[in-house]
Amino acid sequence: MHNRHVYRIEGVDCAVCAVRIQDALNRIDGIGSSQIDLMANRLEIVSDRAMDETLDAQVRFTVQQEEPHASLDLSKHKERTTGKRFGVPMRVLVSVLLLIIAGNLRSPWSFATYLLSYVISGHDVVLRALRNIFRGRLFDEQFLMTLATVGAIAIGEYAEAVAVMAFYQAGEWVQDLAVDRSRASIARLMDIRPAQATILIDGVHKNVPVEQVGVGDILLIRPGEKVPIDAVVRTGESELDTKALTGESVPSAVAPGDRIMSGCINGGGVLTAETVVRYEDSTVATILRLVEESGLRKARTERFITRFARYYTPIVVILASSIATVPPLLGLGSFSDWVYRALVFLVISCPCALVISVPLGFFGGIGGLARMGVLVKGSTYVQSLAEAHMVVFDKTGTLTEGTFSISDVRSVDERFTADKVLSLAASVEAHSTHPIARAIVLHHGPSIMPADHVEEIPGRGIRGVVGDRRIYVGIPKESADESGMHTVVSVYCDDEEIGRIAATDPVRLQADETTASLRKLGIGHLAIISGDHEKPVAAVARKLGITEYHARMLPQDKLAFVEESLKRRKAGKSLLFVGDGINDAPVLALSDVGISLGAIGSDAAIEASDVVIMTDDLSRIPDAIVHSRRTLSIVRQNIMFALGIKVVVMALGAAGIASMWLAVFADTGVALLAVLNSLRALRKVHE
């Protein structure tokens, strides 16, 4: 049995540090895996042990050993801390004042004042570096800054050593503040969680926490209030603002009998509604859980940057050592000159801008998609959406409305009237959830005959026993519909065909626009796979201009088609499958990105899909691809910008042109600009 434990973790901003903590936690007996989401300040542990005091103590001790400034809290809803380490600006100010004083003093007071100034501004950096060295861990940013500034002191550059350390601390503080505010901005986008609900008990209003509301309780929802839990309207009429959930700007009218989702804002009418789920199973809780967990599924770019940072720092230390020693040994200058150049090289080499801005960019992209009503389970799927090369659609309920209406009932056996054919079909179809089955039952009416031994045959039909007759309803071998705009099922009695029923399922209004938009995005390979027979599938494909379609496909046939398509796709390209999230669960899970439409209320859809579009609007698919491409572009801009500036300043430092001042300014400035650039990913498409 696997137990899942979630902590709020604070004080960890470095991806390399996060990986180090994860590796240490994974060595604890009983812990199978651990993941840190830097952007959500979230640590998730999966173990085969219950979270008792012993395991909790082991987790906390391990995190403290690896990162002494980290803190853990088991509360999921702890407020994020902002503006960390407010003592840092005061220390920097005192250090700078002492630096100015030291410049006007004579030795030995001058050196003592420089040293005091250095200790005030950088003692914590030096202590962390020493602690890590004794634990066998080198090559982090504390080590780089300590080595650079102590080296500067060793060669007599006292003022520069102190100034660089003070500037570094100020830059880190501002960077932490920017990241915290970025996290807060993303969190505000998803601030849809209602704190309380008003329930009616014997006509009396009572305010209670949403977690205490049970199924069947009656909610009172006043104008301007959020719907706290998914419910069915009992009295009242109003309009709901669903923008926070679906991205729709037009309010949705509701009346008695309509289901309403939690997180929507009530308009001008007072509603009473009966809850249908508990809060933890409601729409808003599901959305928040998906967004919180999304950071744990990292994109290839994120994983690459984390691995890159682990090897990058040791490499630059080796290069800096070579710069400091090789040229003077070859008689190309003094040791002090080349050591100074090496120290400049070290200061600029810190990979902070990369390891912070890349996950922040992806998390901002996920937040922006959520504002559009598109829930993405992780940054890996943001990257796959951006790299989409082929889109495969299910037909029924995806490209079509999925709401069939019966257009014709015909008897082909003189022993049975059309009404009798419909009655026998409805008797067995009442046990099915297929859209055509529901249409047949609705068309027939409530008075149906009982059926026994009912068995649904996936992709083929349904059979059962009505009275003493064996009834089978399924797709005929040949369709009687020449236009192809109808789906026809045959009704069999004791293995003899007795009639046919034609059902119409109109193509979605947005389907044509969506396929055209996908082609404009360069996704020319579109396909339809369906269990329906040839003519309706061909008619839909022809209407949408899709040349590749496959009909009469059983679930295993769809799976085989997607498997083969995945083998043929180009490297760095992805295959998207769009389906209803229930019947096509295996295909959704197999494809690079499985997308389900309007499926927020379905557990099966959420489990199987990688992307959940909360409305039935197909146009969200090209919008999501555009937004994902923009997000990936922002991430790549950050990588190119950070690496480009670093390479230039490192080269200037090695050539003796750049100073340590420029190096630390470039390092901190690049990090801040990359963080600010990442915030652009929060904006929706067309915003």
Image: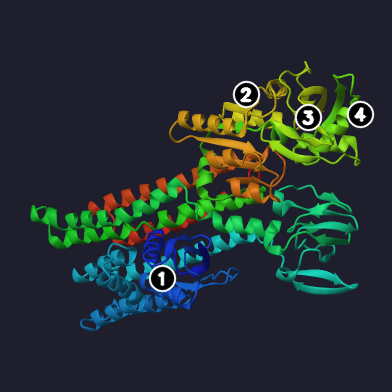
Q: Earlier along the polypeptide chain: callout 1 or callout 4?
A: 1
Q: Secondary structure at mark 1?
A: helix
The answer to which of 375 and 102 lies nearer the viewer is 375
Neighbourhood count class around disc 3 (C-alpha, 10 Å): few under 14, some 14–19, many 20 upward: some
Residue topped by disc 3:
506
At x 26%, y 81%, the residue is 105
Circle nearer the viewer, 4 or 2 = 4
- How many angstroms separate mark 1 from mark 4 (CA)? 72 Å
Disc 1 vs disc 4: Cβ atoms closer than 8 Å?
no
Residue topped by disc 4:
419
Circle nearer the viewer, 1 or 4 = 4
| Amino acid type, mark 1 | Val
Q: Secondary structure at mark 4?
A: helix
Asked whether the viewer can see residue 538, the reply is yes
- How many angstroms separate mark 3 from mark 1 (CA)? 57 Å
At x 74%, y 38%, the residue is 434
Residue 63 marker: 1
Residue topped by disc 2:
549
Residue 464 placement (x, y as % from top left): 77, 36
